[in-house]
Amino acid sequence: MTDITTLMDELTLDEQVSLMAGQDMWNVGGIERLGIGALRVTDGPNGARGGGDFVHGTHSAAFPVGIALGATWDPDLMHQIGGALALETRDKGASVLLGPTINLQRGPLNGRNFECYSEDPVLTAKLTVSYVQGLQAAGVAATLKHFVANESEIRRTVNSSDADERTLRELYLVPFERAVKEAGAWAIMSAYNRINGTYAADNRWLLTEVLRGDWGFDGLVMSDWFGLRSTVDGAIAGLDLEMPGPTIQRGDKLVEAVRRGDVPAELVRQAALNVLRLLERTGTLRDTTPRREVENERPETRALIREAGVQSAVLLKNDGALPLSDSARIAVIGPNARTARVMGGGSAQLNAYRMVSPWDGLAQVLPEDRLSYAEGCTNERFSPVLEGDFTREWFKGDLSGDPVATDTVHALHAFMADGPEGIDPLDHAVRITGRFTAPEAGTWRFGFHSAGRSRLFLDGEEVAEAWDSWARGRTFFEEGCDPVTVERDLGAGQSIEIAFEFATHPTHDLHVSGYHLGVGRVLGQAEIDRAADIAAEADVALVCVGRSAEWDTEGWDLPDMTLPGLQDRLVEAVAARAPRTIVLLQTGGPVAMPWLDRVDAVLQGWYPGQEAGQAFADVLTGARSPGGRLPQSFPTRLDDALTFSGTPEVTYPGEDGHVRYDEGLYIGYRHHARSRPAAFPFGFGLGYTDFAFGKPEVRVKPDGTGDLRLTVTNTGAREGAAVVQLYIAPAAAPVDRPEAELKNFAKLSLAPGDSGIATLALAARDFAWFDGDRRCWAIAPGEYTLRLGTSATDIFATAAVHLEGRDLPL
């Protein structure tokens, strides 16, 4: 085996610096002279996309999104998913997966909540540890992200998350700490945002004092893409790798900084050594073979994704409507009924092997003559991408002169598109021409947005523009303008000439370009009425509503908790006519439900990966019981959420470049315990069976170590899963503490009549709070109440333990 320390002695300063920045978007170049291989990474965390674009690259397996995995409350399942993702990563020629995302769900509107596991640090930590262990056991590095306090997307690249150290240590740092200490994570990605005024990539307290000093991390720290803002500060802080390449802040700039004495040479050596260590750990240190991507769809991976979908589904309400009866005629209604919503947006997107809709899943197991369908309304944020055969002309710089190349494009969506040779991806223009033929009569909405200037012509007339009026909005990771739309009434078969022009312009922050042009028919009350008529003719209506990857996405936050478009009106109309109404929700987080009292059942399905419809069919028909529990509290209304109960603007979305975490420890269920109760509490979820819980046996020593055991029995007639949750409530403490906090949990899947033992281990740290003055974790002496429940508010047993006061090291 190569000794990487010895190998380091052979590297020149220039070569060391070359290892500290990417070569291109996904690769860190090797050192050919010494036979050092290249390091290749791929976006995750709910699949391995590879090096292609976000939606049209090599096919990959799409796993459930983070919040769906959080809803499983199942570390063993997470370990299996980590192992399966390792195979997917290797298929893409990579050895580093950019995931998991383990930020906490501070509020309900973060556009990236779908990508995170939970509002709770312990649930997040336990799932993360298993995921990382499963991934790295197969030789693929996990990359914990985004380190740290990236809990909103609005102005994420410039805002400062201002939080005291106790809040950071007891909440937001916990998943990272445990993944480092317990799972030995090999890589971490710094966040875009600042923490208390200092960019995460430049934050020496975070990257060196806490991560390496307090926790003993010996892996690699990389920047988020274009997230390094400095040459000197980042190197001194402990940021090993700038991504992507080619370098902006390093290269010759860093070499000169070392020679001037601004950056100590030993820090550069250590950073390069960390890159070599990651190469060694992933088995690629001496692998200089060209990397290639392959498609390898595995039946066992499909089965695992389907199982994860079942285990993530949370039954929120059921007045006897589920499972579906064997002979029920089912009206399948809504914008998500025949459109598969399997993933969120942004860098988590990929080109899935398959995308199974609820309709498809039900049609595979039920006679199709029992199913009827109506769309009812749309829930789109953008007009559906315009598809067809279009001619695209490429120009250098602007649209003047003759095009340098011409090709054919079939979908008018592009993101950082690879142009012909000689085209600069950040300095070019395109003109796209073709025709659109309306398949049916109605009002058609044309809409576009772009990271760059754009304008639309219909039949030769300019009808909409973001050219002279272009302004940065909330698309394309806040690099694009807000959507521009225009409507036209068209008859069935009527054809219209399309011309769309796009030109790049200087980027604001993330150096990306792209455009989206779409068209869709405008739906209104007539379509809702038709859906209600169809529902009235069935025995039960399944209303498939929610959001999509356009709404739950990186780069922006949701405007509110309301279902987009006319979906609430659709649910109300169907519930008024259908004999029974089941709502299948697909969102990346909480949603308001003004119709809740008028429907018979609500199933929260999240975005459960490519086998979504099959998992839904399993649960809806009763072939399987829903196994999920809420990993995030669902407020009744937006005003009940903590980010809207503090000082307006300052706590969210921020003011003058600062987001103040004034709520401290009181996020999620901790907040609801002292404020308005949640509509559905953290940890809540119904099933198709019942459980009995035995008397807990508590074995906790005065030092806080020990465990708690109890028997769980399935007393119903169906299989199902029970999730036993352990919360600790301190009777007294010298500092303000939440009423109770989750410290452990156990999930038991049991057949009818079977029993199992739930064992919940406890460590001294579970009782402690962080004392910043004395730089330690402190246990206050006295009584602590152990609360056992099926949610944060549904407690079925308590026990008291008395602890001695003691301090614990960092």
Image: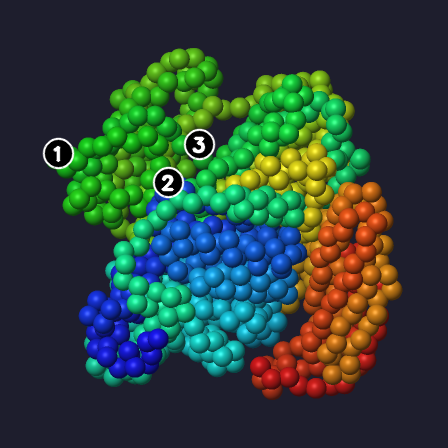
Residue furthest front as drawn: 1
Q: Position of residue 290 (x, y in %)?
A: 27, 56
What amino acid is labelled 1 in the image?
Asp
Check the image and report above or below for 364 versus 722.
above
Secondary element at tag 3: loop
Q: Residues within 10 Å of mark 2 (few under 14, many from 20)?
A: few
Of all residues, the one furthest to the right in this rendering is: 695
The first of marks 1 and 2 along the sequence is 2
Residue under numbered circle 3: 383
One can see residue 255 in this view:
no
Q: Please name the residue shown 33% across and 40% down the image.
A: 414
- Relative to 433, 536 lies left or right: right
Pointer 2 residue: 56
Disc 1 from disc 2: Cα separation: 29 Å
Q: Can you give x and y, in whole percent of width and height, for residue 501 in the image?
A: 27, 33
As helix, strand or loop, the secondary structure at mark 1 comes to loop
Instruction: Measure how far apart labels 1 and 3 are at the Cα level.
Output: 31 Å
Question: Amino acid under label 3?
Answer: Ser
Q: Earlier in the sequence, mark 1 or mark 3?
A: 3
> In the image, is residue 586 above or below residue 241?
above
Question: CA–CA distance between discs 2 and 3?
Answer: 19 Å
Name the kind of residue labelled 2 in the image. His
Q: Which residue: 81% across, 56% down?
A: 755
Q: Is residue 121 above or below residue 237?
A: above
Q: How is the image coloured?
A: rainbow
Per the image, the residue denoted by label 1 is 402
Q: Earlier in the sequence, mark 2 or mark 3?
A: 2
